[in-house]
Image: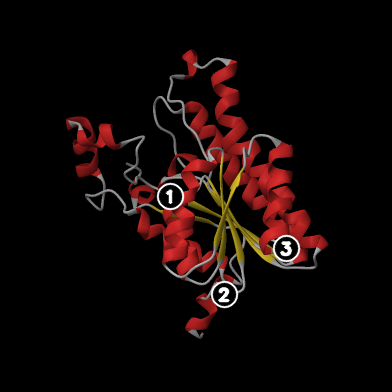
Amino acid sequence: MSLDQFSMSGKVALVTGASSGIGNIVAKGLSRAGATVVAAARRIGRLQQLVTDIEIDGGKAIALEMDVSIRQSVVDAYAEAQDQVGVVDVIINNAGVADPKNFLKIDERSRDYVMDTNFNGVWNVAQEGARRMIDAGMTGSIINISSVLGLHAQNGQTVYCASKGAVIQLTRALSLDLMKFGIRVNTIAPGWFRSEINAEYFDSPAGKAYIERMPAKRLGKIEELIGPTIMLASDAGSFVNGIVLPVDGAITAALV
């Protein structure tokens, strides 16, 4: 296998939730591998710095406003992307939210808030993107970002666990439905990576104690998600389809 198979040159990669965290770093990694990046998020203002950083680094990127939970917003963003840079043939379904609560305290509004983004949003973005690839006669790759909490459960994360588990099963089903069109669908299930959401917890005594119980004895670095993403998105992963790839320092192996 030539290392050229890992190149993203000529590909147009949509990254949702690109304004911060995993989406932001992965978008930069895809650009460095040669992809044109379509950075999408609800708050387009936060995407401008990402586009600037990519352009300074010699890449090409555009920023688009997209609320993945609203079908028309997704359709409009895809149409604009196609007008500006061509058909998207790599989709990184990364947008996600959390609302940690015990099951008995979750009301319909809380449940729907998480499911509308984490599951319905993945559905909307994958479906519209797949339709456009098929209409253009193009093959492609869809990568849905799930979580280790889609593989095992944790107290106080009922709706989040349910949403991420649903994404995993959606991925498996989509891989079968879209295979005949040359569109591969896979899931990355990240373990624990430091973010704005969890930094306070992992700096606390309880959080530090949990890190010590992890097999790797540390949190992941978001940059460590770039390699797995590029493998699944590029021709290097041409026969990888319908899988769940934990990137978690063996947390799922140890079930901690």
Mark 2: secondary structure: loop
- The residues tagged by marks 3 and 2 sit, at their Cα atoms, a distance apart of 23 Å
Q: In this view, which residue lies farthest toward the bottom?
A: 2
The kind of residue tagged 1 is Ile
Q: Which of marks 1 and 2 is nearer the N terminus?
A: 2
Bin the neighbour count of mark 1 within 10 Å (Cα to Cα): few under 14, some 14-19, many 20 and up: many
Whether residue 183 is visible to the viewer of this picture, yes or no, is: yes
Bin the neighbour count of mark 3 within 10 Å (Cα to Cα): few under 14, some 14-19, many 20 and up: some
Relative vertical location of residue 208 with respect to residue 232 in this rendering, above or below: above
Q: Residue 179 carries which label?
A: 3
Q: Which-is-in-front pick, marks 1 and 2? A: 2
Image-quadrant location for residue 72: top right
Q: Earlier in the sequence, mark 1 or mark 3?
A: 1
Side of 256 relative to 73 (left or right):
left
Q: Mark 1 points at which residue?
A: 22
Task: Identify the residue at horizontal 55%, vertical 29% (top origin).
Answer: 114
Image-quadrant location for residue 225: bottom left
- The residues tagged by marks 1 and 2 sit, at their Cα atoms, a distance apart of 21 Å
Side of 197 relative to 135 (left or right):
left
Q: Residue 9 carries which label?
A: 2
Give coordinates of residue 179: x percent, y percent. 73, 63
Q: Which-is-in-front pick, marks 3 and 2? A: 2
Task: Identify the residue at horizontal 58%, vertical 74% (top origin).
Answer: 235
Q: In this view, which residue lies farthest toward the right?
A: 135
Pick whichever, 226 or 162, lies toward us: 226
Mark 1: secondary structure: helix
Image quadrant containing the C terminus = top left
How many discs appear? 3
Whether residue 88 is visible to the viewer of this picture, yes or no, is: no
Q: Which mark is residue 152?
A: none
- The residues tagged by marks 1 and 3 sit, at their Cα atoms, a distance apart of 27 Å
The kind of residue tagged 2 is Ser
